[in-house]
Amino acid sequence: MRQALEGSQAIARAVALCRPGVVAAYPITPQTHIVEGISKLVADGVMDCELVSVESEFSAASVALGAAAAGSRAYTASSSQGIMLMSEVLYNIAGLRVPMVLTCANRAVGAPLSIWNDQQDSMAVRDAGWIQLYCADNQEAVDTTIQAFRIAEATELPVMVCVDGFVLTHTMEPIDLPDQDVVDAFLPPYHFARMLDPARPISLGTLVDPAWFTEARHSHHHALLKALPVIEQVDRDWQAATGRAAGGLLEVIGPADAPTAILCLGSVASTFTEVLEDHPPDDPVKLIKLRAFRPFPAEALRAACIGVKTLIVLERALSPGLGGIVAVEVQAILATVPDAPAVHGFAAGLGGRDMPVELLPDLLAAARAGRPGEFTIADVQLSKLPEEDR
Amino acid sequence: MDAKPTAPGTGSLKAQDYKSDLKPVWCPGCGDFAVLSAITKALAELQVPREDAAVVSGIGCSSRIPAYTSVYGFHSIHGRALPIATGLKAARPDLTVFCAGGDGDGFSIGGNHFIHACRRNVDLTYIVMDNEVYGMTKGQASPTTEPDWTGSKLTPQGPGVAPFQPLEIALSAGANFIARGFSGDPNFVVRLIVEAVRHPGFSLVQVLSPCVTFRPEQRAWKETTHADWAPEAASTDRREAFLRLLDDDGFTTGVLYKGHNPVFAPPHPSSANLADLEKGFAL
């Protein structure tokens, strides 16, 4: 049913539709509304679920891990410093190949302390071995949350659903929430093959010596690569069930043969989709909306870049001392392509700075005036800084 | 920080001198205003030069306090104020170090550090503004919240968990000075902080500090608190202090315990040098 919902409440409702057995909750801005929303649904008797209110994000991730290992469909959510505190457990969850879903309400990582949106938190754990999917709007957040449980359970990998804090979590949007029977048919009751079972005792997390560690890593890496077609197929199945797709691995918006493309992740893709509708047709620009960041859809990216001469990569995070995170990965992936586009890396929107519609023409101008391979923080106001820091 | 160097013992510093120019963003009526005021009054009474004091905090409403003082401030990571303060004190034992924060920060996410800070018994003063709620994230149950408090959206049927007992845990873990105050009796809080700073080792001052926004019923603490642990009659015997706690309703204020456990000191400089050590590896 179509209804006006705050992003966090929409995500909470989507989680409820997936019938998790255990949800672990610890408050952190801007994520708190999600677990509070779930808590209300549990208290109202809408969800038959154990909600465990814990003492830290480390515990939240650990409670979810224990529940998932015991065969329960598990969920938790966090942001920023919470994701950082979870990071040791996040590596464990993925390395143990225990499926679960986590919403990351993206927020900057301190210091300096900021409660506002960027994507440094999820980028900081990109190598933890989780699937990471980025949402451009709250309909995608709902659809991706439901898909995430199916992807996790099909691949035995945890899935992080990334939604921009405040920009999505605190925004009211008209949302189509699927009916329970649609979700039940899409997401059948969960059975974890390696669950902790007294009838068939196993141990999780035992010490692995050098004779096997490399092989465990190899199989984890390949599990992520093998998840690429799963992510695509699950989105196709969702489209068949609801009439809506959520962007597959990546989505190309605008003229397919445009020589200029902008690649971005998250809510700014929605902004740019609108901006490009009014963009002059004699300067064709297309948008590459990257939904799956891990596993990285290298083939899909190469296909999307055929004919592209100038590729702008815009990200809401950076790797200090290097520059772009996504931009560098994109450059590496395109390095073997003949006539590869010139890649121009930009960060913007850090720590909650708005990404206005004017940003797009500014990026186009900066890329066309700049050198390929360069990285710039597009919206830095250098006049605020002392001379030596500019 | 507008640091004007001050010489100790001049008696020239007033409480106001320890306040910064920033106006606190706390809600009107928050108990933390009185705690801030008590810290600055205690500093004035102790005449600690501003450049010789530091306030380290974690994250939360009360953890904003370093910004509101004019001494060295460190607004650190959620729950990690105590280990950071420990490092600070280890590097600069001459500083008067305060740790300040809330019950969520100190007993929940930072609960482990609290236990080990008591054990380590570093000479610093930990002021916990306890309002039995997470205020900054808009009203969730904290470790000190009553199990049947139904005011939180996260635990609408109550947290259902036995409250954390900071004083009992501090006493068990080896803290050297344990006191409880009430922000509605700020002059008494000043006295507790002064005694805490003067007493060597780890000092815990739990200050019941009402959250008028999310726990308006805490305004009644004015009636429920009772100053029955007279500072001059503080127990120096752990057994007696434990017995006092068994009779405590959670609202007794004063000094519970003054111990004489060994105070943490960085290892003494060794008389050995590297050249002597290397002789042992000579082939």
Image (spheres, rainbow, N blue to C red):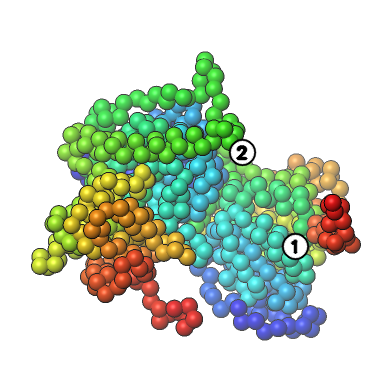
Give amino acid for label 1. Ala
Q: Examine the rendered structure and indicate whether residue A179 appears above or below residue A262.
A: above
Q: CA distance from mark 1 to mark 2?
A: 35 Å
Disc number for residue A258: none
- For label 2, count other residues whose C-alpha is less than 10 Å away and answer few (under 14), some (14-19) or many (20+): few
State the image quarter where residue B176 is shown. bottom right
State the image quarter where residue B165 is shown. top right
Q: Which residue is at the front of the view, A163 or A280?
A: A280
Q: Residue furthest front?
A: B283
Q: Chain of mark 2?
A: B
Q: Residue at x 25, y 27 (%)?
A: A185
Q: Is residue B15 visible?
A: yes
Q: Position of residue B153 (x, y in %)?
A: 44, 45
Q: How many marks?
A: 2
The residue that label 2 is drawn on is B162
The mark closer to the camera, 1 or 2, is: 1
The residue that label 1 is drawn on is B90
Q: Which residue is at the front of the view, A216 or A377?
A: A216
